[in-house]
Structure formats: C-alpha cells, structure tokens
Image: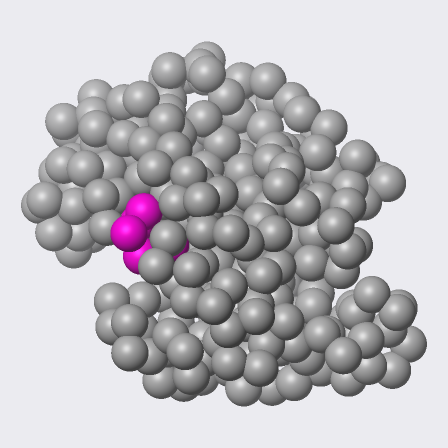
C-alpha cells in the first residue's frame, strides 16, 4: 500500500491489463523526440495518467506489468522490460515505505543504469519517513533520478475503496481527525510533473519535488464537496485507528497489511502535511488543479452514481 497505497487506502498501482500502446512523436518537442519511457503500473491510478501524459508529450510508452511480462518481485523480468528504453517511471505497487520497496527499487534502478536507462523518476510519499530507504536506494543507483513526493490524491474519493464506500453506504469512515487538513493533489498534476521531469533534460535530475493541491481541505470538507456536486446526503465520520483496521479487513485487506496501514496512517495523519508547496507551479508554470474542480468533473462523469 504505498504512497500510492497510503493515498489509495487499499490499493496501489496494481496493473490489471496490458498497456503496450505507443505514443507518436507528432508535435513533440526535441526533448521528447525518440524517448521511450517505461511506465510501471501503466494501468494504475498514477501510472495510467503518466502514460497518457507521456503520449501527449510525444513519448513512446512501454507499459510494465505482469500482463506484459514484468514483475517487481522477479528480477529476471526486468531487463527485457528496460532494454532499449531511455527513461522510466517507477511506482512501487505496495507502500513505498514497505520493507521490500527499497531492495526492489534499488535493484531495478541499478539494472536500468546498467542497460543505459539513466533517467528515472520515482513516485514517493510526502511526509512518509519510511520512504527514506527506497529514496536512498534510487539515489545510490547511479541514475539521473528525480523523486516526486505527492500529497494524498483527490482521486481517492472517486476511485477505489473510498469511492465505493461513498457510493454504497452514503458516508465515509477514516482515521483522519475532523480538523486535520490535507492539500489533496489531482493525480493529473502528479503525472504532468513526472512527464516534465522526464522531458526536461537534466533540469530536474537529482532533485526532490513535493506536489500538493492549491489549498488545505479536511476529509469532512472533501466529502461535503462531493455531496454538493452530486446532490447526495453524504457524511464523514472519523474513527480510531484500531476501529479502522477492522474496517480495512472488512474490505478484504489482509490483517498484516491492515496493521501496517494503520501504523502508517498514525504517523501521516498527525498534521505534518498540513501545508502547501509550490512544486506544481514551479515545474508546470501554472497553479495546481483544485479539489472542487476535480469533484465537479468526476460527478459529471457519473463517478458517484
């Protein structure tokens, strides 16, 4: 459950289908022309949007999933996926702070460098101290790395378990205190920052970029905004971490994983991330998308029924 998982609550960027579509170089800038980027989790919440943004920028996308013969836990599958590429986006499919993340990220990064794939962008978690070993493993690999640390995703309210809970129960339980604020970030902004890092030469190499939304919002306020744009009477209730563990298990999360998540949430939901950064504006030259805009678009698309 990663940065991706912490923010996705019970699922990371697990692939469900192959993604072998390639982009076109029509209209691409010189920095994108001829670039083939490996996108791990290319059908997942962030990876799918990174793949779309990369194609729009003129990059050729090579999706990496078990369906395409890639497996994070099987080193023998890495070279075939990486060979011939020029860059890669790495999003570990469980938590970036999980014990297995650092060895896997370090291993694949070194494999990439040995094959000439030096430009690597890693999705990490804003405020997650446990992400340190995985980030260090990337830094020590010899790659021209960029680390993108994202706030909690706005899309978590419209995709995955939180969205399902809102649709089915008319409310949301979560261990975030009533007054706790988070600068929810639109995943499309995360994807645009990743692609900018991939296509800007050395400009963002060996840099960490924190990306957030434009304002601080509580979980209750976010649910209220969804209620306003859908016309539904949705509610939010904060619950103790232990009670939320049982909630996760009820969603089918294994007990050991639920224990890890509850412990992680206890660290992340302490107010440490209740501040804005200007990473999106610095990289993209525009303000990040607002949660209200996301909610309106998602509601118009029928996200919450």
Asked if the magenta segment contains residue 47, the reply would be no
Q: Residue at x 34, y 59 (%)?
A: 107
Residue 103 belongs to magenta span? yes
Percent position of residue 252, x then y: 16, 55
Q: How many marks?
A: 0
Q: In this figure, which colouring scheme has been used for the structure? A: one colour
- Can residue 242 be seen in this snapshot? yes
Considering every residue shown, the one lying at the far left of the view is 255
List x then y, in percent, for residue 294: 66, 47
Left or right: 29 as drawn, with respect to 77:
right
- In front of the other: 228 or 239: 239
Q: Residue at x 25, y 67 (%)?
A: 73
Residue 11, given in percent of the width and then of the height, sits at 33, 55
Visible residue check, residue 186? no
Q: Which residue is drawn at 73% across and 38% down?
A: 280
Viewer-proximal residue among 53 and 206: 206
Q: Going by the image, does 50 lie left or right of 29?
A: left
Above or below for 289 versus 113? above
In terms of image quadrants, where is residue 231? top right
- Residue 222 sits above or below residue 148 on the image: above
Magenta extent: 101-105
Horizontal side, residue 211 vs residue 178: left or right: right
Give the vertical position of 25 relative to 171 (above or below). below
């Amino acid at each position: 459950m990663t940065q991706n998982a912490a923010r996705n609550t019970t699922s990371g960027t697990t692939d469900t289908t192959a993604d072998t579509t390639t982009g076109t170089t029509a209209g691409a800038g010189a920095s994108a022309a001829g670039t083939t980027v490996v996108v791990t989790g290319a059908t997942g919440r962030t990876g799918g949007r990174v793949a779309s943004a990369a194609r729009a920028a003129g990059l050729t996308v090579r999706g990496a999933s078990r369906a395409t013969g890639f497996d994070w836990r099987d080193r023998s599958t890495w070279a075939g996926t990486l060979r011939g590429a020029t860059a890669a986006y790495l999003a570990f499919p469980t938590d970036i702070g999980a014990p297995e993340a650092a060895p896997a990220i370090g291993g694949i990064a070194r494999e990439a460098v040995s094959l000439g794939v030096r430009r690597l962008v890693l999705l990490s978690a804003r405020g997650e101290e446990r992400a340190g070993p995985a980030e260090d493993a990337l830094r020590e690999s010899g790659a021209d790395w960029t680390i993108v640390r994202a706030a909690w995703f706005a899309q978590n309210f419209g995709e995955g378990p939180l969205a399902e809970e809102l649709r089915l129960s008319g409310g949301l339980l979560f261990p975030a205190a009533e007054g706790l604020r988070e600068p929810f970030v639109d995943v499309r902004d995360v994807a645009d920052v990743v692609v900018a890092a991939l296509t800007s030469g050395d400009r963002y190499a060996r840099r960490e970029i924190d990306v957030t939304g434009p304002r601080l919002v509580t979980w209750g306020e976010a649910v209220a905004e969804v209620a306003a744009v859908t016309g539904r009477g949705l509610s939010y209730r904060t619950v103790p971490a232990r009670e939320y563990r049982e909630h996760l298990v009820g969603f089918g999360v294994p007990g050991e994983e639920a224990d890890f998540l509850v412990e992680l949430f206890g660290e992340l939901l302490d107010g440490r991330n209740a501040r804005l950064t200007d990473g999106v504006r610095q990289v993209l030259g525009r303000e990040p998308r607002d949660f209200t805009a996301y909610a309106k678009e998602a509601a118009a698309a029928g996200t919450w029924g």
